Amino acid sequence: MTLQQLRYVVTIAGCGSFNEAAKKLYVSQPSLSNAVKELEAQLGITIFGRSNKGIHVSVEGAEFLSLARQIVEQADYVESRYLHAPVPKQHFSVSTQHYAFAVNAFIDLLNAFPMEEYDLHLRETRTYDILDDVRSLRSEIGILFLNSSNTKVLSKMFSQNHLEFTPLFRVTPHIFVNSRHPVANKKSVTLKEMQQYPVLTFEQGMYNSLHFSEEIVNVDAHKRHIHVSDRATLFDFLGALDAYIVATGFINPDMAGKEIVSIPLQLDSVTTIGYIALKNAKLSRLAEAYIGCLKQVLTRPDAPLPVGSVIV
């Protein structure tokens, strides 16, 4: 087993494909594949599974990759300090549902860890893709929620894909509307009285079911429904229409604009926001730091948690 082989498998996991990793490593794909096969044969494990959908990290591969990543990071540190080699480019990826606090934490990470070179990814994406990104190690962690509507299905998928969910905080449902909306000055609203207004939801593609919905309350019965795919478009609609979205209630005025307000929804429901990662995989330094930034963002006085929220 060589350091070069460890760099190979870490890069493959980060790229999500042998082809992209070969380009990044400046080696041919056959050479890369042979090097991985030799390593797997030497260790007696399968690191990457192959299928017509691409590659995926095996259970034993996930544990090995977490150790390999640590060795590569330490080797890079030693080389940069004692051999005066250039500091290697830092890599980190997170996939998340459309949460302002996830973006805030990413910004805080960059401010807290100045790096000369980096290749970072913040993917605001569909729920199913979050699971797939983390399962394949395209992202180290994924941020999503669990509640009574999706826990059974998603927990089963976590188990099947060897993922582990770690809670961050619990919230009760809120809605977002613009400050001119007819209900904007109410202390709370019911789902029934909101049915007369257009509702906004994030489109989930072929997995557009309640189990993968990003909205923490089922609004399928509404007569006027607008599906969007990104957060900027959603806030444009909120600002221009008497529309609303069901959300966690966490809102950042700097990102959403002061014209958007959050109102508690009268509903006996609790949602747990958290992150998923591969079981038995030790997170990288940047991943650990990002989780720390997430926790700090959630306790900042300038962007407080909504009413009814509890840090786990």
Image (tube, grey):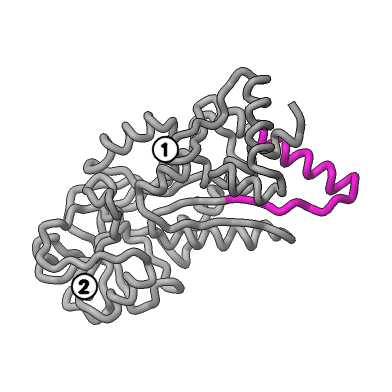
Residue 26 rendering spot, x and y as whole percentages: 72, 49
| Front one among 140 and 293 | 140
User: What span is colored magenta in the figure?
Assistant: 68-92
- Is there CB contact under 8 Å for labels 2 and 1? no
Residue 95 rendering spot, x and y as whole percentages: 46, 51
| Front one among 60 and 194 | 60
Q: Which residue is mark 2?
A: 243
Estimate the spatial distance between the alpha carbons at disc 2 and disc 1, rounded to whole Å.
Answer: 32 Å
Quadrant position of the C terminus in the picture:
top left
Q: Secondary structure at mark 2?
A: loop
Say whether residue 30 is left or right of residue 51.
right
Tell whether position 72 is magenta: yes
The quarter of the picture where residue 251 lies is: bottom left
Is there any visible trace of residue 153 in the rendered image? yes
Residue 24 rendering spot, x and y as whole percentages: 67, 51
Which residue lies most toward the top here?
44
| Front one among 128 and 265 | 128
Q: Which residue is mark 1?
A: 165
